[in-house]
Amino acid sequence: MNALVPLPVLLPLCVTGLELALGPRLRRFKRLVSLAVLGAVCALSVTLMIAADRHGPLHVDLGDFAPPLGVTLVADRLAGLMLTVSSAITLLVHLYSLGQGMADRDERTPVGVFHPAYLILVAGVSCTFLAGDLVNLYVGFEIMLVASYVLLTIGGTATRVRAGSTYVIVSLFSSTLFLVAIAMTYAVAGTVNFAQLAGRLQEIPLGVRTLLEAMLLTVFAIKAAVFPLAAWLPDSYPTAPAPVTAVFAGLLTKVGVYAMLRTQTLLFPGHRLGDLLMLAALASMAVGILGAVAQTDLKRVLTFTLISHIGYMVFGIGLAGRAALGAAIVYVAHHITVQTTLFLVAGLIERRDGTTELTRLGGLARSAPLLAVLFFVPAMNLAGIPPLSGFIGKLGLMRAGVDHGGAWAWTLVAGSAATSLLTLYVMAKVWNLAFWRQAPPGTEEEGVVLESEEDDDGDDGDDGDTESGGTGSRRPAPAGAVVTAGLLGRSITTTRHPPWPMVTATCAAVALGLLYTVLGGPLTTFTDHAAAELIARTPYIEAVLGR
Amino acid sequence: MTVSLALLVTAAVLSAVGGVLLLTRSLTRVLLGAVVLGNGVNLLVLTSTGSAGEAPLLYPHVVRNRVTDPLPQAIALTAIVISLATTAFLLSLAYRSHQVTGSDEISDDAEDRLVALRAEVLHRRGELRARYRRARAERGTTQEQRARYRAARRRLRDRLREERAYQARANDVSGNLWNDILGADPEDYRAGREQGTTDPAGRPGPAPAHDAGPSNDPGESGREPEDGTDGTPDRSPGRPGQPDDPEGPGTEGTR
C-alpha cells in the first residue's frame, strides 16, 4: 500500500511527458488519456484516504534514503482527504475545460499547452499535499506555481500579461521567503524533515522558533491570500479562462491553508501566534466580504468572497483545538468544492451572455432555469444555509470558538456570523441582478463570436481552427467589456446551450457539494479523527521515523 | 558551526538589491531583481551548512571534517533550477508585454482605479447636482449658471475619459524610478505622462510605440470601461450627450 503514495504525483507527470512527446498528433487520444489519468489519481486518492484511515499514516522514503537526506512522502488522514477533494475537483474542471475548448473551436492550444500545464499543476498540488519535508513542500509549491503561471497567462493578451505579472512577482517573492525560512530552519535544526523537525524544534530557543513560525506563516499566508497579503488575488484571478480561475480559486489558496495546518500543528504546537492568526482571520473576513459587496462583476465578487472565506479556515487554525481543526478541515473541503463550482457557473454565464458584469445580466432565472439552480445551490452553500455543508463547517467553527471562550474567540464568532450574513447579502444581490430581474435590453443573441478588442499582434495568425466553420456573426465585444472568457482570452462564442461537458461537470460539482451534506456524519467523524491525529503528532512521527 | 561573514554580507547585499528591483514597475528590472534576489538567497542557503553526518557514500577512511554537508547544496541546486525556469518565464512575459502594450511596465489594476474614480466622480456629481437643483428651486437659474453647471459636469466627464485614455495606453508610470518604488502621487503620474507617450491629440488609443500591428481602433468608447450608471453598452460616438447624463458618451468632438 505504501508504494501507492508517490503515484498521484508521478502519474500526471508521466502523462504530461507522453503528451508533450506526441506533439500535435492524436488529439482525441490525448484528451482521453488526460481524463483517464485524472480519474486514476482520483481513485488512488480515495484509496490512500481509506488506507490512511484504517492503518494510520502511509509513508515512502524515495530512493530508500532515510529521512534527513532523502525525500519523504507521507499520506495521513488530512493529506488523504485533501487529495481526494482536490483530485475530484481537478477531474471535473478538466471535463469542463474540454467542453470549453470544443465550444471555442480552439483545440490546438488546449491540447498543446493547456493540458500539459494543467496536469503539471495537478502533480504539484498532489506533491504539496504529500510532502513530508519542507524542501519537498517548496518543490511542490514551485511545480504548482510554474504551471499556474502558464495557465494564468495562456493566450498572452495584454490583460492577462498584466495580471500574470503581478501574480508571478508576488509568488516569486513568497517562494524566496520560503527558501530563506528553509535555510534558517536547516541551520537551526539540521534537518528539514517534518517528523524530525517536530522533535528538534522543541529544543531550540523560543525566540528563534517563533521567528521561524512567523516566516512560514507569512509565506503560506501569501499563498492562501490572508488579508494583509491578499491584494494580489482579485487583481490576477478574474482575467484567466473560467476553468483556470475555478481551479485556482478552489485549490491553490487551499494549498496554502493546508501548509499552514500542517506546519502549525506538527512543527509549532502550542500556537504562540494563535491570536495573530485570529486577527488576520477577522481582517480577511471583513475586508474580503466588504470588497465583494462593492463589486459589480460576478468573477470579482467571487474572488473577494474567496478572500473572506479563507478567514474561516485561518480562524480554525488560530483556535487550534481538536474541534476547531476538525471544523477547519471540513471547511477547507467544502470551500474547495463550492468556490470552484461558483466559478464554473460564472463561466457558464459568460458562455451564455458573453459577460459576467452584473449590470448587463438579467432574467436568467426565466431564460436559463438550469443555470439558476446550478448557481443557487452553491451560493446558498457558500452563505451557510442549513442543511448545506457550509453550515456544518461554520457551525463547527463557531462552536469551537464558543467552547474556547477567549475574548478573541468571541470576537471571531461574531465576525464570522456577520460575514455569513454579508455573504448571503452578496449572493442575494447577484441573484437579484443576474437571475431575478428582467433582462436589460441589448443582451446578446445566440451564436455571436465576441472578440476582444485587444490587438492581436499577428505572430500566431494561423488560427485556422478558430476561424473555420464559425456559424455566428463575428463582432467586437460591447464597449467596456474585456473579453477574458475563451481559453486564449481573445474571443468567445456565446450560445444558449453550453456544450454538454461543461454542464455535466458543473452539475457534478454541485452534486459533490451536496454529497458533503449527505455524508455529513462520516465526514465530520473523519475530520475529527484527522484533527486528533494532527494534534497527537505521534502517529505521523512514528510512521515516518519508524519507531 | 561557524558561518563565513563574507557570505552572509554578500547574501544580504544581493537580497537588498534584488528586493528593491522587485519593487519597480519595469518587468525587465523585476527580472533582474528576481535573479539577484535568488542568488542572494541561495548563498544564504549555503551558509546554513552544518558538519557532515554519516552519509551513505562516505568511505571509512574519509575525514569527516573535510567533507561538506550535501543537503544545503542539493537545496540550493533545486532553487537554482527553479529560479532558472521562473526567470525564463518572466523574460518571456516581459517580451510579450512589450509586444502587446509597447512597454514592459506593469500598469495599475484597471478595476482598482476605476472603483476609486467612480466613487469620486459619482460623489462630486451628486454634490453638484444637488447644489444646482437647490439653487434652481430657490430662485431659478440664469443662463450663466446653467452654463457653469454644464461646464462643471463636463470637467468631471473629462476626468473620467482622461482616466480611460490613460488606462488604454497602459502607461501610468511616472518615469521616475523612486516614485515607482515608493508609490507616486497622481501628480507624479501626470508629469510622467507628459514626458511619456501621448499621441498628439491626447486621445485615448494605443501608445505610439505600439505600431507593430494594425490597430483595430473600435472608437474611443470601445475602450471605455463600464460606468456602472448606464447599463446598456453604447457604441455611438456621434450621439450628443444628454443634459442629465453627465457621463453620457458622445463628446469626442468637444476636445
Image (cartoon, rainbow, N blue to C red):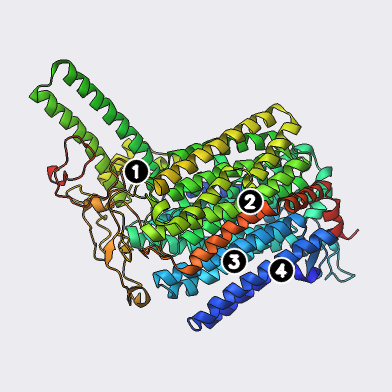
Disc 2 or 4, which lies upstream in sequence? 4
C-alpha separation, residue under disc 3 versus residue under disc 2: 17 Å
Identify the amino acid type marked 1.
Ser
Identify the amino acid type marked 4.
Leu
C-alpha separation, residue under disc 2 versus residue under disc 4: 20 Å
Structural crowding at the residue carrying mark 3, measured as other residues with C-alpha within 10 Å and reported as few (<14), some (14–19) or many (≥20): many
Q: Which residue is mark 2?
A: A334
Query: Circle 1 sits in a helix, a strand or a loop, which is it?
Result: loop
Relative image position of residue B82 (x, y in whole percent): 59, 63
Q: Are marks 1 and 4 on the same chain?
A: no
Identify the amino acid type marked 3.
Leu
Do the residues bearing badges 3 and 2 touch, measured as CB atoms within 8 Å? Answer: no
Q: Which residue is mark 4?
A: A44
Relative image position of residue B145 (x, y in whole percent): 13, 24
Do the residues bearing badges 1 and 2 touch, measured as CB atoms within 8 Å? Answer: no
Res. A175 visible in picture? no
**In the image, residue A10 above or below residue A55:** below
Relative image position of residue A541 (x, y in whole percent): 84, 54
C-alpha separation, residue under disc 3 versus residue under disc 4: 13 Å
Instruction: Provide the chain ID for the residue under circle 2.
Output: A
Q: Which residue is mark 3?
A: A91
Structural crowding at the residue carrying mark 2, measured as other residues with C-alpha within 10 Å and reported as few (<14), some (14–19) or many (≥20): many
A276 left or right, relative to A193: left
A261 left or right, relative to A98: right
Single out the mark in the foreground, 1 or 4.
4
The residue lying toward the viewer, choosing from B100 and B133, is B133
Q: Which mark is residue B174?
A: 1
Residue at the top extreme, as displayed: B138
**In the image, residue A522 above or below residue A143:** above
Single out the mark in the foreground, 1 or 3.
3
